[in-house]
């Protein structure tokens, strides 16, 4: 699920039922997905798509790049369409693991590890590696306050540095194009809380048991898919994939398909989400209208800055 909400702090609200079926008026039909990104939870219609989310990030970088260019600096030279595609792919990979790994093509090569993205243009440029003058243009007066002896530069080559530097300017321009009412925190709350509720639903626990029995029949002992994915042997900070990891990951997905774990989890979580969406219909209706407006504004910025 690709959400700008991830940039905004969420809240936890204790409502609904836990450990049993929600009293849904319209139960969700259980699909039988065979791979990742074939399911879209009800709340996703109120948020940016993965592509829009990546564009949202890239627009900020493009504005910074254009601003730095006015002062004669080439910054973030690795901004390419390829990089934007990698951002989308990375988000899709993360989303595809909501109920554990589900992408067989990736599991066959990387096991439980994420597929790495390519390095676009050599070593990344870090802020601290930049000369002081360039950092001052990038960050504005924050550099002058944070570095002993650093001067608070407001102009460079006769051009006034924006408040907060080029980063501050980019944030203002991009965020002005995105309407954000206070209700936006609902997105994260609905996304987070209903996933948590669904995990203790008796129907989900039952499919976990069936999946676990399937794994056990293949010689692997895990209570649920998250325990398998979190096995300390698959250290995400160490990219080393063993044949055993790949074998278990493939079996994990095979057992998910045999038990339809993905489809059952999706249908049950969707029931919980639909109840929450119904309770917050007015606020979410406002957000949907804001999303349409923000989408148009982001499209205009994308054309303006070549994002």
Image (tube, grey):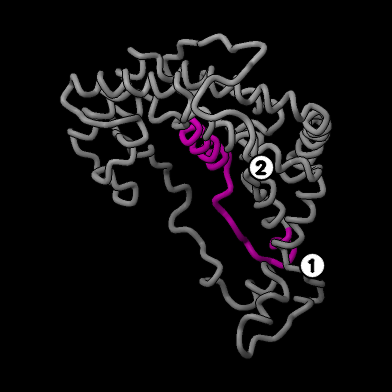
Taking 53 as reference, is 164 left or right? Answer: right
Instruction: Name the residue carrying label 1.
Output: 162
Q: Reply above or below: 180 against 128.
A: above
Q: Quadrant of residue 249?
A: top left
Instruction: Kindly identify the residue that appears in the image at 59 percent across and 12 percent down.
Output: 28
Is residue 57 inside the magenta stretch? no
Determine the residue located farthest toward the left in the rendered image: 219
Q: Please state, as top left, top right, bottom left or bottom right, where the N terminus lies in the image.
A: top right
Q: Secondary structure at mark 2?
A: helix
Q: Residues within 10 Å of mark 1 (few under 14, many from 20)?
A: some
- Looking at the image, which residue is at 29% across and 50% down? 238
Residue 90, image x, y percentages: 49, 38
Foreground of the two, 228 or 173: 228
Q: Local crowd at mark 2 within 10 Å, few (<14), some, or many (≥20)?
A: some
| Along the viewing direction, whichever of 296 and 111 lies nearer the viewer | 111
**Rendered image: mark on residue 151:** none
Corner quadrant of residue 260? top left
Magenta stretch?
67-95
Q: Position of residue 280 (x, y in %)?
A: 76, 30
Indicate which disc, 2 or 1, sits on the residue closer to the N terminus: 2
Q: Which residue is mark 2?
A: 5
Q: Is residue 271 left or right of residue 218?
A: right
Left or right: where does residue 231 sit relative to residue 165?
left
Callout 2 touching callout 1 (CB < 8 Å):
no
Residue 121 percent coordinates (x, y): 47, 51
Kind of element beneath mark 1: loop
Kindly report the secondary structure that dominates the magenta region of the rendered protein.
Answer: helix
* Left or right side of 101 for 78: right
């Amino acid at each position: 699920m690709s959400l700008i909400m991830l940039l905004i702090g969420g809240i936890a609200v204790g409502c609904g039922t836990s450990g049993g079926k929600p009293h849904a008026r319209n139960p969700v039909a259980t699909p039988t997905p065979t791979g990742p990104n074939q399911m879209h939870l009800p709340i996703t219609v109120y948020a940016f798509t993965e592509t829009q989310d990546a564009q949202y990030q890239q627009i900020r970088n493009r504005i910074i790049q254009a601003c730095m260019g006015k002062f004669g600096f080439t910054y973030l030279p690795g901004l390419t369409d390829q990089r934007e595609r990698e951002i989308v792919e990375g988000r899709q990979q993360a989303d595809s693991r909501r109920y554990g790994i589900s992408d067989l093509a990736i599991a066959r090569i990387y096991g439980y590890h994420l597929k790495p993205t390519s390095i676009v243009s050599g070593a990344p440029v870090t802020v601290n590696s930049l000369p002081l003058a360039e950092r001052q243009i990038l960050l504005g007066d924050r550099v002058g306050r944070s570095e002993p002896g650093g001067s608070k530069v407001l102009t460079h080559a006769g051009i006034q540095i924006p408040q907060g530097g080029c980063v501050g300017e980019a944030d203002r321009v991009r965020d002005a194009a995105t309407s954000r009412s206070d209700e936006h925190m609902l997105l994260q709350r609905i996304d987070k809380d209903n996933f948590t509720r669904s995990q203790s639903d008796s129907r989900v626990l039952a499919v976990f048991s069936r999946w676990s029995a399937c794994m056990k029949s293949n010689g692997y002992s895990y209570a649920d898919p998250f325990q398998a994915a979190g096995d300390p042997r698959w250290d995400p900070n160490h990219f080393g994939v063993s044949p055993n990891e790949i074998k278990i990951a493939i079996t994990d997905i095979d057992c998910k398909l045999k038990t339809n774990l993905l489809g059952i989890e999706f249908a049950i979580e969707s029931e919980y989400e639909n109840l929450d969406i119904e309770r917050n219909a007015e606020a979410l209706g406002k957000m949907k209208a804001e999303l349409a407006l923000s989408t148009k504004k982001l499209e205009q910025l994308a054309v303006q800055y070549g994002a």
